[in-house]
Structure formats: C-alpha cells, structure tokens
Image (cartoon, rainbow, N blue to C red):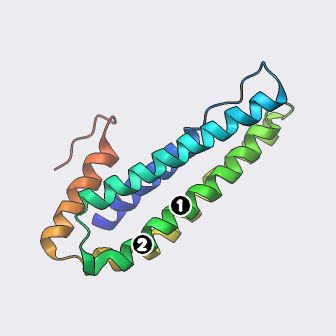
C-alpha cells in the first residue's frame, strides 16, 4: 500500500507538470509563439526542478541515499520529457483532429503516464527500501498528503 501511494503521488507530479504547459497564443507572429513556447518550457522545467528539490527535502534524503535519489530524480525528469512529447503531439494535431484522433492521442498520453509510473516505481523501490523505518514513515506521510490534496480524501 505504501508503494502504491508513493507511486500515485509521483504520477500526479508527472501529470501536473505535463499539463501545466501554457498554450501557444492564437495571435501574434510565429517568432513570438517560439518565444512563448521557450518561456513556457523554461517555466515548466523550473517548476519540475522545484518539485524534485522539494521532494528531496521532504523525504530527508541522506548523503548515503543520494546516489539512489539521483537515479529517482533523473527518472522523474526523463518521464516528464516523455509525457511532454506525447502532450505536444496531441496539441499539434488538435486543430484538425477528429474525435478518434483526439481519443488516440489521449490514449498515448495515458500510456506514457502508465509507462512512466512503472519506470519510476522500479527506481524508487530501492531508495524506499534503503530508508530506515522512521524515514519511510515520513515518506508515507508526504506522499499520502500530496496524493490526496484537493480530492476530499483524508489521510490516516
């Protein structure tokens, strides 16, 4: 149950960052759209790094856990990049998409998300197992709190 809750939290982080992209403005020149995309991507990347750093702090990652954490953080970055690619693909076709095109594009996003969660679970597991029980409890509380925020659900 603990791992499932942790995975749910991390997947929420991944999806939130993927959908936090600002849309390209409908007006303006192509050059402005490129600048807007670059600013949006930079802002999104900064937010993702802030989430990763915040999670590092809240989990109280120790020096001895740092190598395992680095693997987790890189997996999070890689997963976000993968999800961003399929979100970008969907956004690029949405103007002329049929309902079927949109559903298939959304299915690609959902699949990328599921694949990301599995990849993350593989690298997070060793870090979680390396944590002492007290730190695991902190991790459980952090993830339960974050995973249920705004859903009306209460943690134990």
Along the polypeptide, which appears first: circle 1 or circle 2? 2
108 and 48: which one is in front? 48
Q: Which of the 4 image quarters holds residue 58?
A: bottom left
**Image position of 108 with respect to 28: above or below:** below
For mark 2, give the secondary structure. helix
Q: Is residue 76 left or right of residue 2?
A: right
> Residue 29: percent from the left, percent from the top?
83, 24
How far apart are the alpha carbons under marks 1 and 2?
A: 11 Å
Which corner quadrant holds the N terminus? Answer: bottom left
- Residue matched to label 1: 77
77 and 109: which one is in front? 77
Picture residue at 30% right of the left edge, 74% below the top:
128
- Residue matched to label 2: 70
> Residue 2: percent from the left, percent from the top?
28, 65
Picture residue at 57% right of the left edge, 46% below the top:
18
Q: Which of the 4 image quarters holds residue 130?
A: bottom left
**Image position of 105 with respect to 37: above or below:** below
For mark 1, give the secondary structure. helix
> Residue 105: percent from the left, percent from the top?
74, 46
């Amino acid at each position: 149950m603990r791992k499932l809750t942790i995975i749910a939290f991390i997947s929420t982080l991944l999806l939130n960052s993927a959908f936090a992209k600002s849309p390209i403005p409908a007006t303006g020149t192509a050059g402005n759209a490129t600048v807007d995309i670059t600013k949006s991507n930079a802002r999104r990347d900064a937010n993702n790094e802030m989430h990763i750093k915040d999670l590092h702090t809240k989990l109280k990652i120790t020096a001895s856990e740092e190598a395992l954490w680095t693997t987790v953080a890189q997996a999070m970055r890689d997963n976000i990049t993968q999800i961003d690619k399929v979100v970008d693909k969907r956004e690029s076709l949405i103007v002329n998409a049929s309902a079927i095109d949109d559903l298939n594009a959304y299915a690609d996003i959902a699949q990328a998300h599921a694949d990301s969660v599995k990849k993350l679970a593989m690298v997070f597991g060793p870090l979680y197992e390396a944590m002492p029980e007290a730190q695991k409890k902190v991790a459980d509380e952090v993830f339960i709190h974050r995973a249920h925020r705004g859903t009306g659900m209460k943690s134990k």
